[in-house]
Image (spheres, rainbow, N blue to C red):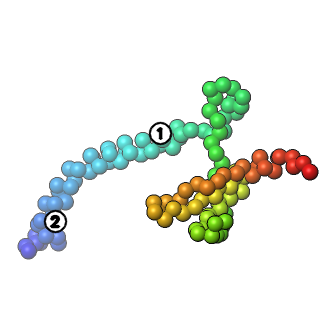
């Protein structure tokens, strides 16, 4: 490969670099547009804590809080399979899932609101 004495790089590299220089303004413009879109999406996102949303018809409800999950695997009552109990301590909920071998998916066996269960009065 021939090199020019004033340029230590091969001639093909210099031609390739000169062709890329014409794309730089286009790349800068594309990056600026992407940055603007990202800014709009980030800043203009939904605000989950609306002070005026309480009790007003048509108002948006606050989003669900991010949970803290604990999963416990245990044999099912029938003994044929195992179930997975998932407890969300932040939202006070529990779901029981069972593995379906034929479909290779989890199926919901049960759901409980732990907050509702704690508020329930148990009579004797």
Name the mark nearer the viewer: 2 or 1.
1
- How many numbered circles are shown? 2
Q: What's the CA distance linking mark 2 and mark 1?
A: 39 Å
Residue extending furthest top? 57
Tell me the quadrant of the picture where the N terminus can be found. Answer: bottom left
| Residue 80 picture location, percent across and down | 58, 69
- Residue 81 lies left or right of residue 90; in this view the side is left
Residue extending furthest bottom? 1
Q: Which residue is mark 2?
A: 13
Q: Which residue is mark 1?
A: 40
| Residue 68 picture location, percent across and down | 67, 58
Looking at the image, is 28 positioned above or below residue 85? above
- Please tell me which residue is depicted at 69% across the width and 26% down the height of the picture: 56
In which quadrant of the rendered view does residue 95 lie?
bottom right
| Residue 4 picture location, percent across and down | 10, 70
Asked whether the viewer can see residue 68, the reply is no
- Residue 33 lies left or right of residue 6; in this view the side is right
Looking at the image, is 99 positioned above or below residue 29? below
Secondary-structure class at tag 2: helix
- Please tell me which residue is depicted at 16% across the width and 65% down the height of the picture: 13
């Amino acid at each position: 490969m021939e090199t020019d004495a004033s340029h230590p790089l091969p001639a093909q590299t210099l031609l390739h670099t000169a062709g890329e220089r014409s794309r730089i303004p286009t790349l800068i413009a594309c990056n600026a547009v992407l940055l603007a879109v990202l800014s709009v999406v980030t800043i203009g996102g939904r605000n989950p804590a609306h002070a005026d949303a309480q009790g007003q018809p048509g108002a948006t409800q606050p989003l669900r809080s991010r949970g803290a999950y604990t999963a416990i695997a245990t044999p099912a009552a029938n003994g044929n399979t195992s179930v997975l109990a998932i407890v969300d301590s932040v939202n006070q909920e529990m779901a029981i899932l069972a593995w379906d071998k034929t479909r290779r998916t989890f199926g919901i066996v049960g759901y409980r609101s732990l907050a509702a269960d704690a508020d329930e009065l148990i009579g004797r």
